[in-house]
Amino acid sequence: MKRTRIIHVLHRMAAGGTELALSRVISGLDPQRFENIICTVAPVPDGIGNGFHCVSLNRAGRKTGSLVADFARLFRNAKPDIVHSRNWGAIEAVLAAKLVRVPRVVHSEHGRDINTMNGDPWRRRVFRRFAYGLADEVFAVSRELREHYSAQVGIAKSRIGFVPNGVDTERFHADDEARIRMRSHLGISPTAFIAGTVGRLDPVKDHTTLLQAAELLGSAESDSHIVIVGGGPEHEMLKTRIAANPALRGRVHLAGESGHPERWLNAFDVFVLPSLSEGMSNTLLEAMATALPCVVTHVGANPDLVDGGQSGYLVPVRDAKAIADRVFQLIADPQLRFRMGQRGRLKVTQEFSMARMLENYTRLYTLGNPLPVRHAALSRA
């Protein structure tokens, strides 16, 4: 049986949520049915993308110029059955694929950066509308993104489908041994309280507000700590701010990047996500699968995942006091933490499992329905 050749196009391969979701999809799809190729605009860093068939246009710098001709040349030579572009940085692949008559073209939206989280410049909106019209299927990973881009480009919501992210609930689960081991690595007592986060150190994740919340937590003189796992452009700024503030030194720990987020999540008592904007956060799904109560901002798909007061708390963006107040509540009530964590894990296993996500993508690539997925948690949209 001839395999379906898919070229997955994105701007870069890095330690972000879009790239993580793509890696999980490619790893989980049936290799007897699908051949997967990753195409990036930016060069692929050493050690990134190992184990996958990757090609790159090798366009460095912020301004890449038109990519249509390069994409078209690649697609003409590779002869894919499907081209699937992700986010704005790869959207020119839609036009290129149509020009060389690729049989099916898919485009998906997975999130927004800090510069466009409140809206796109008009030129982007015009080209997005054009590209959406060309694509055979368009989808978003969250209800909020679907509504946002429907309004931005002026098309009906029914034109944009849903394919939510999923999480491996066997890999991500509560593990007492990992909890002890990772706390020992940081020199933190097994009985101390840790509020932690995992993700790229990017301005849109708003770790600055998390540091402000850490100051408020430290003022109570409790044995509480903040652990931030990840790397990115904000690392040096955060490191400098922590070193300069006596209230943060010894309480806020930058753990760096890790290929084992499941170990770090087990070190936490509470997961905190202070983002200014989100698509559907993979790390939030992972934290819920690890049975952690979650304190998250009311953005993106976070309200679809966290049932406020049941599996965690939703707080306004840039509100350090609200984060600190909710964490204080959870410090004071271990039974509440346990109940919330169990409810969160149950929701993930029932609605956002890896198996369900792979079924969704298999259906998308096989059937080509313009509305590839109806998802229980999002059907109210």
Image (cartoon, helix red, strand yellow):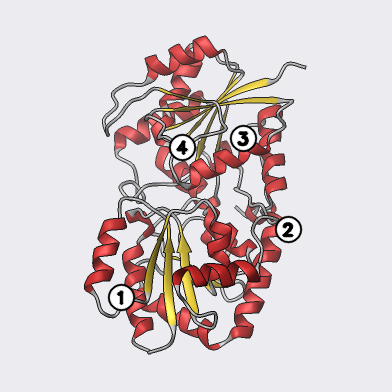
Point out residue 264 in the picture as x, y percentages from the top left corner. 53, 63
Distance (Cα) linking label 3 and label 4: 17 Å
- The picture places residue 69, in percent across and down from the top left corner, at 38, 14
What's under tag 4, amino acid-wise?
Gly
Which mark's residue is nearer the viewer, 2 or 3? 3
Instruction: State the residue at coordinates (45%, 17%).
Output: 96
The residue under the point 60% across, 84% down is 334
Q: Decide: few, some or many residues near mark 3? Use Cα within 10 Å; few <14, some 14-19, many ≥20.
A: many
Among the two numbered marks 1 and 3 on one chain, the one whose residue lies closer to the N terminus = 3
Task: Say which amino acid is labelled 1.
Answer: Arg
Q: Which mark is residue 350?
A: 2
Separation of residues labelled 2 and 4 (CA atoms): 34 Å
Mark 4 residue element: loop
Q: Nearer the viewer, residue 375 or 80?
A: 80
Q: CA distance from mark 1 to mark 2?
A: 40 Å
For residue 47, which numbered disc appears in the image?
Answer: 4
- Between marks 2 and 4 in the image, the one whose residue lies nearer the viewer: 4
The disc placed on residue 26 is 3
- Kind of residue indicated by mark 3: Ile
Mark 4 Cα-neighbour bin, 10 Å: few <14, some 14–19, many ≥20: few
Q: Is residue 330 above or below residue 10?
A: below
Q: Can you identify the residue that label 1 sits on?
A: 249
Q: Earlier in the sequence, mark 2 or mark 4?
A: 4
